Amino acid sequence: MWEAHRAGAGGVELPESCLAAFEYGWQLGGRPEADVNVTSDGVMVSLHDVTLDRICPNLPESLRGRNISEMTWAELQSVDIGWKDFPDQHVVSLEQLFAVLQEYPERHMVIDYKRVCVKTLAEMINRYGVASQITFASCDPAILREFKSLAPEARSKNWLGGTAETIMENFARLHEENFQGITEVQLHLNDRGNADWRYDLSPEFVKEALQITANSGVLLQVLPWQFERADLFHILDLGVRSFAVDFPNKFKKICADYFTRLG
């Protein structure tokens, strides 16, 4: 299983946070990711930031710097977050996304915990009957365990970021706790500029983590923020088979090349 980061296309191949980006991720066979914010009138939406400033360069002056929690759903829908060559796109609500999951039970998505009441989110997921199609992600194991108790059919993903030392320490802690309440672990692969292995985490650690999680029945996923063909080939050679990416089309092409050669 692979994740299409930031609403299906990472804001790189398509505008992030719109329904078309999620459809793009689904069409490519991935699990598009929604970061959750809540409008002033209680609508849960997929949006990474607390404002629209970054993803909407032509944002009206009256909305610049305004927190999503201070906007109504109607105000949010009045803003076109599309690009010049991909216009008329709008922030999508979780209810719109869950309706798609209901229609297509083979589809899945990731929800990254940001600024929402866990209980309220779980109640909506259960009401739509899509818990088995959801992976709930957070860097806080306590929040993951709380969510899992409310929506037990859902998967739970603990993402580990920061320095290599921090990631290894937090992974060791999860291992000591026997990955309680956690079904997936994601390692952030941060660049260090090395030509042979470009990432801060060593390949030896990634391979060891893969074995540890496999023995515990937990899926290991990596997020390489940047990658070229040789980088992805190297990661795949370690045995990693789950990724989160900002460049889904590029990722799929390289995987096609790799697995063709693998025979």
Image (cartoon, rainbow, N blue to C red):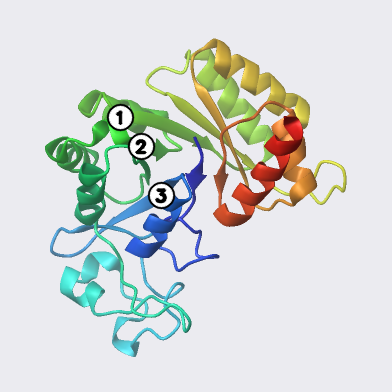
Compute the Cα span from label 1 to label 2: 7 Å
Separation (CA) of disc 1 from disc 3:
18 Å
**Hey, which quadrant is residue 76 in on the image?**
bottom left
Q: Which residue is more in the foreground, 243 or 198?
A: 243
Quadrant housing residue 208: top right
Location of residue 2 in the rendering, given as x and y in whole percent from the top left corner: 51, 40
The disc label shown at residue 26, or none: 3
Q: Do callouts 1 and 2 mark residues in contact (Cβ within 8 Å)?
A: yes
Q: Amino acid at mark 1?
A: Ala
The residue sitting at 51% across, 21% down in the picture is: 174
Q: Bin the neighbour count of mark 2 within 10 Å (Cα to Cα): few under 14, some 14-19, many 20 and up.
A: many
The quadrant holding residue 118 is: top left
Q: Which residue is mark 2?
A: 136
* Residue linked to disc 1: 154
Query: What distance separates the C-alpha of mark 2 from that of mark 3?
Result: 17 Å
Q: Residue at coordinates 72% horizontally, 35% vertically from top-left?
A: 235
Q: Which class describes the residues within 10 Å of circle 1: few (<14), some (14-19), or many (20+)?
A: many
| Residue type highlighted by circle 2 | Phe
At numbered mark 3, what does the secondary structure look like: helix, strand or loop?
helix
